[in-house]
Amino acid sequence: PETIETLGKLLRDGGLVAIPTETVYGLGANGLDSEAMSRIYEAKGRPSDNPLILHVPDMAAAKPLVKSLTPTAQRLMERFWPGPLTITLPKADCVPDRATGGLPRVALRCPDHDLCRAVLTAAGVPVAAPSANISGRPSPTTADAVYDDMKGRIDAILDAGTCDIGVESTVVECGDDEVTILRPGGITEQMLLEVVSKVNYDTALSSPTAVPKAPGMKYRHYAPSAQVYVVDQAETFAKLDLDVSCGVMATSDLLENLPVPEENKFNLGKNLTEADHNLFAGLRYFDDRPEIKSIYVESFDQGEESLAYMNRLNKAAGGHHV
Ligand code: TXA
Ligand code: MG
């Protein structure tokens, strides 16, 4: 309890604290303090037009941050919070432009993580928190990964082990009885349809030339230093000319039969859920191995269930497929 109070005070007073969530680790700062948020951009090397998500412990804490908590927003929060759904709504005047990158909407999220929410409650202010990686690097799913990127740049890291989900939250723009998905995540179209009549997708998710409504989606992301290739068909793995400079990320059954040294294999697990959980750790595993020049990664074709995984993987690969 003392640690939680200490971290809450550190956040309130303008410090930078990395916090665990159920998706990935976040780099937290006081979301009402522009100077504190500027330090997030500095620590991450983040482009200044890319807005931050404000994290709150509950719906009541979200209310003062928006112009109006509309019935649709309330229904979404009641159904999916705490959980991996980030909701954008027209911002209240008290939210600094620094939090929204000058946009008229603010993004809000309530993580499904008890320790995280305890820190948010102790802070007593909304906590702005992007993923706690250097901009462009894979998001961190362990405290060690945060430390690798952020050592010497921030005040504290709260180590709560490995994040459950492993890919970031679904980001939706909240309309009147409809939402638009700006970034796919664990909360899928089908789940959202339990609460709203219509679910749209930001056109930028399918068109490479459209400007995304979530500014962060336009950057090449999640990319390690080796070239990543999406392997479209599982059969292709056996036909690849794999040498010692190649890393492979695939599910256990596929990996087993490949003629690749064990240390060049990264096991994504048994299924899509485990692959979500392990994707960023795998990209970081090969990043620590400068002799690895290319990384071949299994793709999943499970409709909207695999959208979040494929969105992150395609970004890491910068469009390279085999
Ligand atoms: O799961 C998550 O969402 C994690 C954990 C730490 O909560 N956070 C996270 O934050 O992924 P970040 O900053 O790495 O990604 C936030 C995304 C970016 O693409 C950003 O452009 C978008 O959300 N975003 C934030 N505020 C927005 C706004 N007002 N309008 C549109 N997009 C917004
Ligand atoms: Mg991020």
Image (tube, helix red, strand yellow):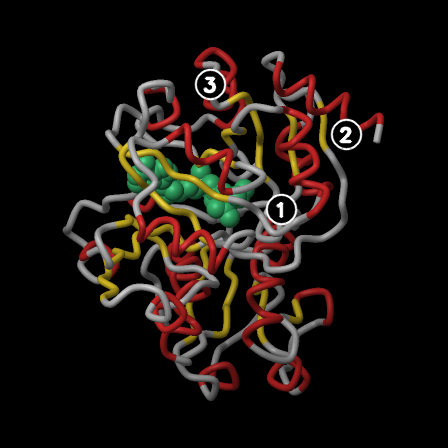
Q: Is mark 2 on a helix, strand or loop?
A: helix
Q: How far apart are marks 3 and 1 (CA)?
A: 20 Å
Query: Does mark 1 have its CB less than 8 Å from ligand 1?
Result: yes
Q: Which of 4 and 267 is in front in this view?
A: 4
Mark 2 surroundings: few (<14), some (14-19) or many (≥20) residues within 10 A: some
Return the x and y of residue 121 as percentages of the image width and height: 65, 31
Mark 3 — residue? 32
Q: How far apart are marks 3 and 2 (CA)?
A: 20 Å
Mark 2 — residue? 4
Return the x and y of residue 206 as percentages of the image width and height: 22, 62
What's the amino acid at mark 2?
Answer: Ile
Q: In which quarter of the image is the N terminus?
A: top right
**Of the image marks 3 and 2, the number of the one nearer the N terminus:** 2
**Count of numbered labels shown in the rendering:** 3
Mark 1 surroundings: few (<14), some (14-19) or many (≥20) residues within 10 A: many
Mark 1 — residue? 21
Return the x and y of residue 263 as percentages of the image width and height: 72, 65
